[in-house]
């Protein structure tokens, strides 16, 4: 698919240079463009900032007709339209805020011999909820004006991922109604399972899948045992920022809105300008925080995972996880907001015993949720494997640890550990749990209670566990959870 002998190859090259003013294609861009221009359905998996938009924006300029782009975020679509206009490309957006006149104009153009725009951006709701729009799209298709359909964040169609959206599931009707218009789906994150499911949901079983390597070489991955008190965690973070990242932008992901507020205020007290960001902020406040951060008036954003899609600040130097993500996929995405500019950046995760149980309560209702969390626990517990290896295995890729270039804590020899036999310690933990269950207390057991009860106090200190520190016992318990000896 990377050939330049297609009938459109010359014109594709010249549009790249003259209209987009780019010198060459990046990895997989030409492949995706050729495939979609051949009429094939395509799924393109490429890390954020890799250049997915070009793969449907450029084909939109080859030949007549229009390209419909389905994207979940209006603000992102607006940004795209501005940058397209800058290149001299006409693009329109239809959403709830469009005026009657605009809608009328767009609808007319959709069936006209020479439409006044090349790309039409709509939200998935437009497809799932507006009969009027679908009727118009049908007419557009019948007048051979519907060149192709691009679907951004296409993984949202799969229930296997974490971002499932019901409106995306309905996009399956597109292929049924418009079989001759190729679909090109784009995403930054996809496991094989999610990709297969996405194809199924969208009725594009023969779609070609192009995938760029997910490895982000400039990111240093590190996991640190979380200190026991909030104060100590903050001290650790402040020291890290002051000694390595003075005045450099970063993100701290926190578990809850309350955590965000606490961390932000503690940092501010210590002279590091920060702001909280979570779903409960008003849209105005969100925009304000986002802008202040973009303009470097705030150094650190303390955010829940609500802070994500649409961030494209290139020079984020660190992403700290105050508590663990709910899956490796989420972690990869969240931490991946560091170092978009290609310069070195740090991805540090604080791994705390009680955080594991907080997360598991959140995801407990779904089996996939627990599986995903278990993988995340493995990522945190493993002190022998390269972090890059752990991530790539999760995504079904194999990156060799040689290619890590000591850009993770394991490969750069930061772990200190000793080998020892923990059999009797495990047995002791299991009898503690059994005992609690036999008393009918099983449901009220927490991780901390097990550790406390098993270790005993003073004279009752359990012999089997005596030689271990509390944090070592916690680690043993987590290993047992991860191995599914206990649930
Ligand atoms: P994605 O959607 O994958 O996150 P974008 O499509 O927004 O990424 O592209 C990210 C940036 O890379 C944009 O500024 C875009 O102009 C630039 N870009 C894309 N392709 C190329 C290319 N072939 N050469 C140079 N710059 C490119
Ligand atoms: Zn490594």
Image (tube, rainbow, N blue to C red):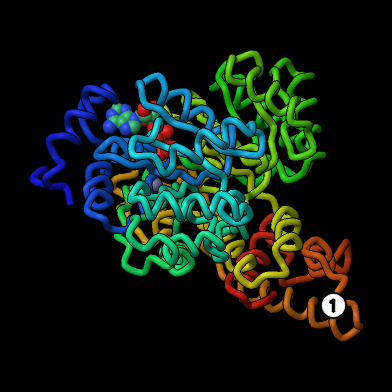
Q: Is residue 381 visible?
A: no
What percent of the width, then of the height, locates residue 158? 53, 63
Is 327 in front, or is 385?
A: 327
Find residue 413 and report its image quarter. top left
> Quadrant location of ligand 1?
top left
Q: Is residue 347 left or right of residue 428?
A: left
Tell which of 427 and 238 is nearer to you. Answer: 238
- Residue 108 drawn at (x, y percent): 48, 38
Horizontally, residue 407 falls left or right of residue 15, namely right
Q: Residue furthest bottom?
A: 438
Q: Residue at x 29, y 35 (%)?
A: 61
Q: Residues within 10 Å of mark 1 (few under 14, many from 20)?
A: few
Residue under the image location 71 percent in, 36 percent down: 233
**Rendering coords of residue 472 (x, y %):** 66, 58
Q: Residue at x 84, y 64 (%)?
A: 449
Quadrant including the C terminus: bottom right
Residue that sits furthest to the left in the current view: 5
Residue at disc 1, secondary structure? helix
Residue 432 locus on image (x, y percent): 80, 76
User: Which residue occupies 22% across, 53% down?
Assistant: 38
Count the labels in the image: 1
Tell me if residue 68 comes above or below residue 427 in the rendering. above
Where does label 1 land, which residue? 442
Between 188 and 485, the residue placed more toward the observer is 188
Front residue of 223/170: it is: 170
Q: Quadrant of residue 299?
A: top right
Residue 481 visible within the image: yes
Asked if the residue at label 1 sits under 8 Å from ligand 2, the reply is: no
């Amino acid at each position: 698919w990377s050939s330049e002998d297609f009938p459109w190859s010359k014109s594709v090259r010249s549009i790249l240079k003259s209209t987009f003013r780019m010198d060459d294609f990046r990895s997989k861009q030409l492949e995706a463009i050729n495939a979609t221009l051949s009429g094939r359905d395509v799924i393109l998996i490429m890390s954020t900032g890799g250049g997915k938009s070009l793969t449907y924006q450029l084909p939109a300029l080859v030949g007549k007709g229009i390209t419909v782009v389905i994207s979940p975020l209006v603000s992102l679509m607006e940004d795209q339209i501005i940058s397209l206009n800058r290149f001299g490309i006409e693009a329109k957006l239809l959403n709830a805020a469009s005026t009657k006149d605009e809608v009328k104009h767009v609808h007319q153009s959709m069936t006209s011999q020479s439409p006044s725009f090349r790309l039409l951006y709509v939200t998935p709701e437009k497809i799932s909820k507006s009969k009027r729009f679908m009727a118009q799209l049908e007419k557009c298709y019948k007048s051979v004006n519907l060149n192709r359909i691009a679907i951004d964040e296409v993984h949202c169609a799969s229930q296997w991922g974490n971002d499932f959206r019901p409106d995306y599931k309905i996009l399956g009707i597109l292929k049924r109604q418009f079989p001759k218009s190729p679909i090109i789906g784009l995403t930054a994150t996809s496991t094989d399972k999610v990709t297969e499911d996405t194809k199924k949901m969208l009725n594009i079983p023969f779609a070609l899948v192009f995938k760029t390597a997910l490895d982000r070489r400039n990111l240093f991955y590190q996991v640190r045992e979380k200190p026991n008190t909030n104060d100590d965690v903050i001290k650790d973070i402040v020291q890290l920022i002051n000694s390595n990242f003075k005045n450099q932008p970063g993100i701290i992901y926190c578990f809850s809105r309350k955590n965000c507020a606490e961390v932000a205020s503690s940092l501010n007290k210590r002279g590091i300008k920060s702001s909280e960001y979570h779903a409960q902020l008003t849209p105005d406040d969100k925009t304000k925080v986002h802008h202040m951060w973009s303009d470097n008036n705030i150094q650190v954003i303390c955010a829940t995972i609500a802070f994500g899609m649409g961030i494209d600040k290139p020079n984020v130097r660190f992403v700290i996880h105050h508590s663990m993500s709910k899956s490796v996929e989420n972690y990869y995405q969240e931490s991946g907001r560091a170092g978009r500019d290609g310069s070195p950046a740090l991805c540090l995760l604080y791994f705390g015993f009680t955080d594991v149980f907080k997360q598991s309560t959140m995801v407990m209702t779904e089996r996939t949720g627990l599986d995903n969390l278990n993988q995340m626990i493995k990522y945190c517990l493993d002190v022998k494997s390269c972090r890059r290896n752990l991530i790539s295995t999760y995504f079904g890729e194999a990156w060799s640890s040689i290619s890590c270039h000591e850009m993770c804590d394991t490969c750069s020899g930061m772990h200190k550990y000793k080998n020892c036999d923990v059999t009797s310690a495990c047995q002791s933990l299991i009898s503690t749990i059994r005992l609690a269950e036999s008393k009918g207390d099983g449901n009220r057991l927490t991780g901390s209670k097990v550790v406390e009860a098993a270790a005993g106090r003073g004279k009752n200190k359990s012999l089997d566990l005596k030689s271990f520190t509390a944090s070592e016992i916690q680690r043993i318990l987590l290993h047992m959870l991860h191995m599914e000896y206990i649930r």
